[in-house]
Image: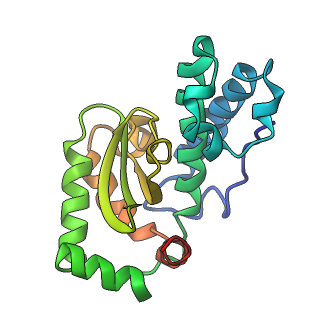
Amino acid sequence: MFTLPDLPYDYQALEPFIDEQTMHVHHDGHHAAYVKNLNEALADYPEWLDKEVAEVLKNLVQIPEEIRIKVKNNGGGHFNHSLFWESLSPQAEKEPSGSLLKDIEKIFSSFSDFKKEFTQKAMGLFGSGWTWLAVKNQKLIIQTTANQDSPVAEEIIPILGLDVWEHAYYLKYQNRRAEYIEAWWNVVNWRKISDKYSQNL
């Protein structure tokens, strides 16, 4: 059975950048629903319930066709949000360190240029979806996915994800996605993401 992970901080810990009410609705409502729906979809296939959700997403072609879309959507929602929560911290650093910072500067010219490109991709994503910093063929890329699609299903390793579904920001920022993204940079857990990158080199 898949379970909803606890937040690694209190619901109000990311204030004023991400508000407490949004964290309750986002984690206890939306993410919990993805976990519930995923377990229900796979209830008749217990062999899949014992696997990591990333493994399920990498092997969607093996999932029975009648439940494949439901598993893709809800499995992606579970995986994406689990990564999202751990990518945030109330004691966030201004930038990454070590090999991650060096490779960002090498690929994107500078950390500020990386932030600008990442923000532009997030702003340009039509409708609901995600913007990712990910590793593909041992190289950093910025990628967007629609809805709850996840890079891990394409054998790409996401190390940082920004949720740009309106449910992630609408209570505080309404339709002002740009303000939400600008605020989000203040709570990115670069220590965690730098460690994750080092583990996947």
Q: Residue furthest top?
A: 66
User: In percent of the image, x 74 and y 21: which residue is there?
Assistant: 40
Residue 186 percent location from the top left of the image: 39, 70
Residue at the image position 75 percent from the left and 42 percent from the top: 51
Query: Is 78 on the left or on the right of 166, as rendered?
Result: right
| In-front residue for pair 6/55 | 55
The correct choice, above or below, for 79 with respect to 37 in the image is below
Give the answer, above or below, for where 129 lies relative to 37: below
Q: Is residue 95 visible?
A: no
Q: Along the line of sight, which residue is nearer the eye, 116 or 22? A: 116
Q: Position of residue 36 (x, y in %)?
A: 72, 28
- 62 vs 22, left or right, is right
Image position of 32 with respect to 123: above or below: above
Q: Quadrant of residue 176?
A: top left
Residue farthest to the bottom, as pictured: 98
Residue at horizontal 39 percent and vertical 68 percent from the top: 138
Q: Quadrant of the N terminus?
A: top right
- Please state the horizontal and vertical placement of residue 99, each as a whole percent of the image: 41, 85
Q: Residue 15: horizontal and vertical position, in percent?
A: 50, 62
| Camera-nearest residue between 84 and 173 | 84
